[in-house]
Image (spheres, grey):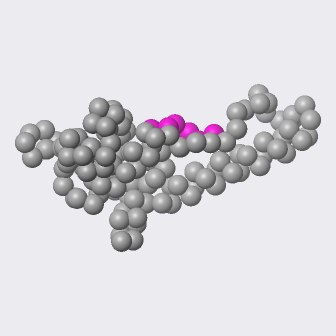
Amino acid sequence: MKISKKAYYGLRASLALLETKKPLSIHVLAEKEGIPEDYLEKILQALRRQNLLEAERGTKGGYRIKKNNLSAWDIISTLDGPLKLYPSLIKGSLPCFQPTHCQTNTIFRELEENLELTLKNIHLTSLINQK
């Protein structure tokens, strides 16, 4: 499993938007966070399409957080898709061809579920309040 640079930038940009509590333009946000503007624009558009951000037009416009209690999972799953720790080697459901296949798969399924739950419980506002 690997978190992409896109998700990392998305988390940083979202935290910066939460800190300012006002709309920020892509240019200002990119400069503040050291993220390439074109890349940041694609990231913010993906987050906006999932209703996590909203965009305001005009000279005082920009992007702002739309969703209350935005979690790390919201950002990562939007930008990277579901996190998979291993490829599904065995297709289908029980019974497995060998018991060890099912037992091993159970370990990784539980790990994936716990990882998702942990990321869902990390709310970005709590990170801002840690300062």
Q: Is residue 92 visible?
A: no
- Check residue 29 for magenta coloring: no
Apparent side of residue 122 relative to residue 19 in the rendered image (left or right): right
Apparent side of residue 109 relative to residue 3 in the rendered image (left or right): right
Figure quadrant of residue 126: bottom left
Foreground residue among 4 and 121? 4
- Check residue 82 for magenta coloring: yes
- Write the residue at 35% across / 65% down: 128
Q: Which residues are magenta?
A: 79-84
Q: Is residue 72 visible?
A: yes
- Write the residue at 78% across / 46% down: 106
Q: In which quadrant will I find the N terminus?
A: top right
Apparent side of residue 122 relative to residue 58 in the rendered image (left or right): right
Foreground residue among 50 and 122? 122
Q: What is the chief secondary structure element of the magenta stretch?
A: loop
Q: Is residue 114 above or below residue 80?
A: below
Residue 27 position within the rendered picture, expressed as x and y whole percent measured from the top left: 20, 41
Q: In which quadrant will I find the C terminus?
A: bottom left
Residue 50 position within the rendered picture, expressed as x and y whole percent measured from the top left: 37, 38
Residue 19 position within the rendered picture, expressed as x and y whole percent measured from the top left: 27, 60
